[in-house]
Image: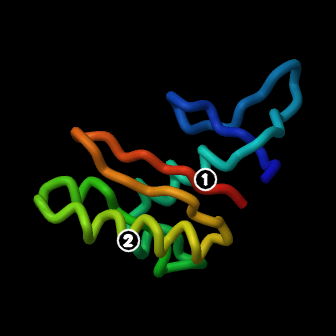
Amino acid sequence: MNDYLLDPVTNDLQVVDGDFVIGDATQQNQKQLLFASPGGYKQYPTIGVDIMNYLKDENFNDLLSAIRQQFVLDGMTVNNLSYVNGQISVNAQY
């Protein structure tokens, strides 16, 4: 999905030569959903995985379930989702 891109470090809008940068924002949206806490977006108070809270637990099945649910609710098709050796692997597209 094309959208305005954010700088991966500062989370500010990317601007090149005075214009906003537009490109594939799938990974950007996935990152935003992973780190957002429910209630963080006032217009959509139920979105967000709040991954930092899950990482305190040892139950990664709940984490994977929450990720899948949020990605599907956002309109993505989740082809593969796994947690191996401390790494979350996601294959999901709009």
Left or right: 83, with 10 as reference point: left
Q: Position of residue 51 (x, y in %)?
A: 32, 57
The circle on residue 38 is none
* Spot occupied by residue 50 in the image (x, y as percentages of width and height): 34, 62
In the picture, measured across the screen, residue 85 lies left or right of residue 44, that is left
Amino acid carrying label 1: it is Asn
Q: Which class describes the residues within 10 Å of circle 1: few (<14), some (14-19), or many (20+)? A: some
Query: Which residue sits at x=36%, y=72%?
Result: 65
Q: Are marks 2 and 1 in contact (CB under 8 Å)?
A: no
**Is 63 placed left or right of 42 in the picture?**
left
- 71, above or below 89, in the image: below
84 or 59: which is nearer to us?
84
Q: Estimate the spatial distance between the alpha carbons at disc 2 and disc 1, rounded to whole Å.
A: 15 Å
Q: Which mark identifies residue 66?
A: 2
Q: Of callouts 2 and 1, which one flags the residue occurring earlier in the amino acid sequence?
A: 1
Q: Residue at x 55, y 53 (%)?
A: 30
Give the SS element for disc 1.
helix
Q: Secondary structure at mark 2?
A: helix
Which image quarter holds the C terminus? bottom right
Q: Amino acid at mark 2?
A: Ala
Q: Nearer the viewer, residue 23 or 87?
A: 87
Pinpoint residue 13: horizontal percent, then vertical percent.
69, 37
Q: Could you say which is closer to the camera, residue 38 or residue 19?
A: 38
Q: Nearer the viewer, mark 2 or mark 1?
A: 2
Residue 29: which numbered mark, if any? 1
